[in-house]
Image (spheres, helix red, strand yellow):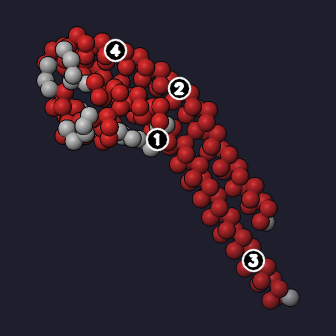
Amino acid sequence: MQDGERVGGKDSVVKAILCATIVFSMGYVSFAIGRMYRRKVRFYEELLAFIAALKIDINYKQSLIADFAGSFACSSELTEILELFASNKAEPCGAAIVLKIFGDEENAEIEEFFSYLGKSDAVAQTSHLDFYAIRFEERLCTAKQKLQSEGRLYAKLGIMLALFICLIII
């Protein structure tokens, strides 16, 4: 009887380890999907801050846009775009812009925004920035709504699915 109890004990330990691994893995994947929504929100917030700061710079300091872009501090995917823009490696800058967190339509809009920067006078630049600030504000609101609904949904569904699989295993 003791051998049978040991086998059952080992079996339950293996099941517990397997269940813990499944819950951890599914939780990690589901939170990674949710993180994509948070990255979109952060990107649009930083892009809007960049636009506001650039408008102030155009109206008062009037430094070169490439210099301003290189000195703007941010922490999201916007950093990659601004580094390209500041180093003038992209011809036009937008041609190299493909962000994995966005779809084709959003990437095209961001590309279009950056391709026009520095190509006209201050008045036209300011109106261009105002136009895109409105569009990106709408994108930010949509991203926040998706974060609240879909981002949390993926996290909850991932954990629930992992627990369901664990119930089947046990």
Q: CA distance from mark 2 to mark 3?
A: 48 Å
17 over 139 or under it: above or below: below
For the residue carrying disc 1, how many other residues have a C-alpha within 10 Å: few (<14), some (14-19), or many (20+)? some
Identified at 56% across, 27% down, the residue is 145
**Residue matched to label 3:** 11
Instruction: Give the mark nearer the N terminus: 4 vs 2.
Output: 4
User: Which numbered marker is on residue 151?
Assistant: none
Badge 2 marks a residue whose secondary structure is: helix
Can residue 121 be seen here? The reply is yes
Give me the C-alpha separation between circle 4 and circle 2: 19 Å
Residue ID for mark 4: 130
Judging depth in this view, the residue of 5 and 36 nearest the camera is: 36
Rounded to the nearest angstrom, the CA distance separating label 4 from label 3 is 64 Å
Find out whether the residues at labels 2 and 3 contact each other: C-beta distance under 8 Å. no
Mark 1 vs mark 4: which is more N-terminal?
Answer: 1
Q: Name the residue located 19 percent from the left edge and 14 percent from the top edge.
A: 121
Q: Residue 135, located in which quarter of the rendered image?
A: top left
Point out the frontmost of discs 2 and 3: 2
Q: Which residue type carries mark 3?
A: Asp
- Precedes in sequence: disc 2 or disc 1: 1
Which secondary structure lies at badge 4?
Answer: helix
Q: Which residue is mark 2?
A: 142
User: Mark 1 and mark 3 in contact (Cβ < 8 Å)?
Assistant: no
User: Which residue has dot 1 on it?
Assistant: 101
Q: Residues at badges 2 and 1 in contact (C-beta under 8 Å)?
A: no
Given the image, on which type of amino acid does mark 2 rest? Thr
> Looking at the image, which residue sits at the far right?
1
SS for callout 1: loop
